[in-house]
Image (cartoon, rainbow, N blue to C red):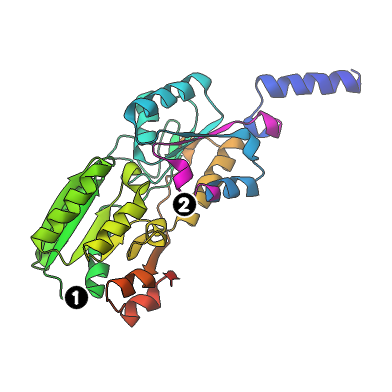
C-alpha cells in the first residue's frame, strides 16, 4: 500500500470512528450551558482553563438560559439534537435539564449540590452513564456562613435569610441555617424571592423583623443583580454574607464558598480526560477541596463595622 493511500485511509478512520482524542482539535466541539447569565459571571476563568489544555474559544459555544425556564428548555433541546463532544453544565437547572432530556453525549457539571439527590448521578464514586462533574456547597455550609457573619456581628439576636427560588437546593440550605440558628437560640426571618422587584420588599420585611445580620442565598436571576442586592443590604444597614466572591466585589460584606478557580480548573481537566477517551461513567464526581472567604472593608466601614482580626486572618480576599 502506498504511503499516501495509507494516510488517506487513516484520516477517514479517525473521522468515522476513532476515539475523540485522535481527532483533529478543530473537530472537537464543547458547549457551555449556563442556566443564568454567563457573561455576568467570571466565565473567562473557565475559558482560560480550557485554553490551557489546548481548547480554543473558536471551538467553544456559550449558551445562557438567562434564568428563563422556557429558554433553557429550548437550549437543552438544541444540545440534544446537535450532540456536542462534551457539554459543560453550569448550575443545577442546566444539569437537570440535560439529564431529563436524556442527552446521550458526555456532560461535565459544575456548581451542582447533591447531584445524587437531584437524580443526576447514581453515586459520586461511580456516576454511571454520561454525567460527571464537580459538586458545590452542600447544605452544611449554610451553618458555616451563619457562624462567620455572627463572628462579625456577635450581638445579633435576629437574623434574616433571603433566598432565590431559582435554585431548588436553596430550600435545604435554608433549613440547615434555621437549624443552626435554633441551636444558637436566634430568631430567624426567612423570605423567598423569585423576581427582582421582590427584593426591596424582602429587605423591608427583614428590617421590620429587626434582623441584625443577613445570609443571602442567590440564584441565577439574583446573581445577575448582585449590585442591587448589595445596595439594598447597605441601605437597610444589614451586614450580609453570600456564596460567591463576585457578590462581595460588587458590594456585599462577606462571602464564603467553594473556590471558583478550583471548580473551573477541575471541570476543564474532566473535559480534557473525556476528550482523550475516558468515559464519564468511570470518572468520579469531585467535591470541592478549597473554600474562599472574601471580605469587603469598604462595605464594613460604610456599615460602621470593624472586621475582627480572626476573620481577616483567614480571609482569602480582602477588598479595600
- Spatial CA distance of label 2 from label 1 is 32 Å
Q: Nearer the viewer, residue 61 or 202?
A: 202
Element carrying mark 2: helix
Query: Is 257 above or below relative to 56?
Result: below
Q: Quadrant of the N terminus?
A: top right
Residue 28 is covered by the magenta coloring? yes
Q: Quadrant of the C terminus?
A: bottom left
Instruction: Please tell me whether mark 2 or mark 1 is closer to you in this view.
Output: 1
Q: Is disc 2 surrounded by few (<14), some (14 to 19) or many (20+) residues within 10 Å?
A: many
Element carrying mark 1: loop
Q: Residue 69 at x, y = what percent?
A: 33, 29
Residue 212 is covered by the magenta coloring? no
Whichever of callouts 2 and 1 sits on the residue coming sooner in the sequence is 1
Residue at 32% from the left image edge and 66% from the top image edge: 253
Query: Is 270 above or below relative to 102?
Result: below
Quarter of image, res 119: top left
Q: Residue 158 at x, y = what percent?
A: 11, 65
Q: Which mark is residue 254?
A: none
Quarter of image, res 17: top right
Asked whether residue 277 appears in the rendered view, the answer is no
Q: Is disc 1 surrounded by few (<14), some (14 to 19) or many (20+) residues within 10 Å?
A: few
Q: Residue 204 at x, y = what percent?
A: 15, 55
Give, as a single range, the part of the protein colored magenta: 22-44
Q: Nearer the viewer, residue 42 or 108?
A: 42
Q: Nearer the viewer, residue 7 or 34?
A: 34
Residue at 67% from the left image edge and 28% from the top image edge: 27
Residue at 19% from the left image edge and 75% from the top image edge: 154
Marks counted in the figure total 2
Residue carrying label 1: 154
Residue carrying label 2: 263
Position of 54 with respect to 153 (left or right) is right
Amino acid at each position: 500500500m502506498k504511503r499516501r493511500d495509507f494516510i488517506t485511509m487513516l484520516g477517514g478512520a479517525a473521522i468515522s470512528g476513532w476515539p475523540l482524542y485522535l481527532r483533529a482539535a478543530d473537530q472537537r466541539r464543547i458547549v457551555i450551558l449556563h442556566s443564568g447569565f454567563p457573561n455576568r459571571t467570571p466565565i473567562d476563568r473557565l475559558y482560560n482553563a480550557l485554553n490551557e489544555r489546548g481548547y480554543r474559544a473558536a471551538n467553544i459555544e456559550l449558551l445562557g438560559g438567562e434564568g428563563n425556564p422556557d429558554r433553557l428548555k429550548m437550549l437543552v433541546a438544541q444540545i440534544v439534537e446537535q450532540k456536542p463532544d462534551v457539554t459543560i453544565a453550569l448550575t443545577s437547572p442546566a444539569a437537570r435539564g440535560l439529564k431529563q432530556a436524556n442527552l446521550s453525549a458526555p456532560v461535565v457539571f459544575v456548581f451542582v449540590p447533591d447531584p445524587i439527590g437531584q437524580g443526576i448521578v447514581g453515586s459520586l464514586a461511580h456516576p454511571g452513564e454520561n454525567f460527571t462533574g464537580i459538586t458545590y456547597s452542600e447544605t452544611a455550609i449554610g451553618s458555616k456562613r451563619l457562624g462567620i457573619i455572627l463572628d462579625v456581628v456577635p450581638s445579633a439576636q435576629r437574623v434574616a435569610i433571603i433566598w432565590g427560588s431559582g435554585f431548588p437546593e436553596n430550600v435545604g440550605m435554608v433549613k440547615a441555617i434555621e437549624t443552626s440558628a435554633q441551636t444558637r437560640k436566634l430568631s430567624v426571618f426567612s423570605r423567598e424571592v423569585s423576581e427582582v422587584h421582590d427584593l426591596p420588599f424582602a429587605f423591608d420585611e427583614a428590617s421590620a423583623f429587626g434582623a441584625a445580620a443577613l445570609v443571602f442565598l442567590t440564584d441565577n436571576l439574583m446573581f445577575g443583580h448582585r449590585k442591587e442586592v448589595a445596595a439594598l443590604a447597605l441601605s437597610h444597614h444589614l451586614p450580609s454574607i453570600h456564596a460567591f466572591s463576585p457578590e462581595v466585589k460588587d458590594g456585599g460584606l462577606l462571602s464564603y464558598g467553594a473556590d471558583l478557580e478550583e471548580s473551573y480548573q477541575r471541570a476543564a481537566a474532566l473535559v480534557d480526560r473525556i476528550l482523550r477517551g475516558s468515559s464519564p461513567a468511570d470518572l468520579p464526581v469531585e467535591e470541592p477541596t478549597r473554600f474562599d472567604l472574601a471580605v469587603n472593608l469598604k462595605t464594613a466601614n460604610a456599615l460602621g463595622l470593624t472586621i475582627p482580626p480572626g476573620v481577616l486572618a483567614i480571609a482569602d480576599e480582602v477588598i479595600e
